[in-house]
Image (cartoon, grey):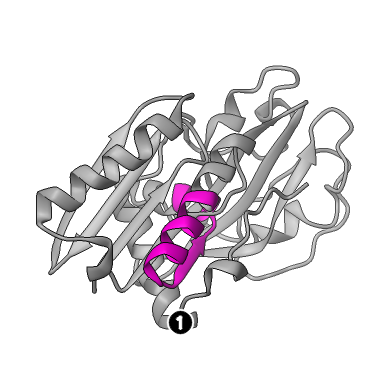
């Protein structure tokens, strides 16, 4: 399967190309000027493997949530390429890519992604890793206000419980460990927020935190291929960014 995948929702540009069972990738660590990097990186990878956009089965991209400008860049570029070359699109959750990247690198079985959404808010999602090593979303991706603790009671505790218990009696930002020996690990720059600090609001903090984790090419490609097999692609006019707010 021939796939072009990219994500610009967080710091940097991650681009991956799978062509004739060969994988090539690039990462540019930049928090700005992503528009200046993303197209040259794609062109460089295509030249490296001797391919063109016409050779692709589909194009995948990180649809957010994340930095507003980065999410817009990826969505606009994906739509432009799809319209120009008549290719289907696979919009992928950028939080899922972050979690999948951590699962690949660290082998963690339960992952809570927390990304700084600015204005005292975070984007948060809880994932479990299945027997094939793929992340599965538990509950929903949400945006939370850290200072006012809005929308917390009904969602956060229940999403991380392996036995799917519904826990609604939380009065602070609490993510509950699963029953037995199951625990969770934190990923994303939301864990670095200091006012207030996310961990200080928890009754059960993560075992370990990878706050500077970036989206990996491997994570992008794995999720793109799974989504293609399960759901197929969408037309360019059906591909939308996910800002969560």
**In the rendered image, the vertical position of residue 49 relative to residue 231, given as above or below:** above
Kindly give the residue lying farthest to the front in the view shown.
84
Say which of 193 and 175 sits in front. 193
Say which of 6 and 142 sits in front. 6
**Left or right: 120 with respect to 73?**
right
Say which of 53 and 185 sits in front. 53
Q: Is residue 93 magenta?
A: yes
- Identify the residue at image location x=41%, y=72%: 86
Label tally: 1
Q: Residues within 10 Å of mark 1 (few under 14, many from 20)?
A: few
Residue 70's spot in the image, x, y percent? 54, 38
Whether residue 46 is visible, yes or no, is yes
Residue 237's spot in the image, x, y percent? 60, 68
Span shown in magenta: 76-98
**Left or right: 20 with respect to 183?**
left
Residue 178's spot in the image, x, y percent? 60, 58
- Identify the residue at image location x=10%, y=57%: 50
Q: Is residue 29 magenta?
A: no
**Left or right: 239 with respect to 142?**
left
Residue position for label 1: 230
């Amino acid at each position: 399967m021939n796939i072009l995948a990219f994500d610009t929702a967080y710091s940097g540009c991650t681009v991956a190309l799978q062509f004739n069972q060969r994988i090539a990738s690039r990462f540019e660590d930049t928090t700005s000027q992503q528009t200046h990097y993303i197209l040259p990186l794609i062109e460089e990878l295509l030249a490296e493997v001797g391919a063109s956009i016409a050779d692709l089965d589909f194009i995948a991209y990180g649809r957010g949530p994340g930095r507003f400008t980065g999410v817009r860049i990826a969505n606009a570029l994906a739509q432009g390429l799809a319209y120009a070359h008549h290719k289907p699109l696979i919009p992928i959750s950028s939080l899922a890519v972050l979690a999948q990247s951590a699962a690949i690198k660290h082998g963690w079985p339960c992952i809570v992604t927390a990304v700084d959404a600015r204005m005292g808010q975070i984007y948060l999602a809880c994932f479990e890793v299945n027997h094939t090593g793929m992340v599965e979303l538990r509950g929903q991706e949400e945006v939370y206000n850290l200072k006012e603790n809005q929308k917390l009671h009904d969602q956060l505790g229940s999403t991380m419980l392996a036995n799917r218990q519904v826990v609604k009696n939380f009065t602070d930002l609490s993510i509950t460990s699963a029953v037995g020996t199951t625990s969770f690990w934190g990923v994303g720059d939301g864990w670095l927020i200091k006012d207030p600090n996310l961990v200080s609001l928890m009754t059960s903090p993560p075992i370990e935190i990878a706050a500077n984790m970036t989206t990996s090419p491997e994570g992008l490609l794995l999720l793109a291929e799974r989504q293609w097999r399960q759901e197929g692609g969408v037309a360019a006019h059906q591909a939308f960014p996910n800002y969560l707010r």
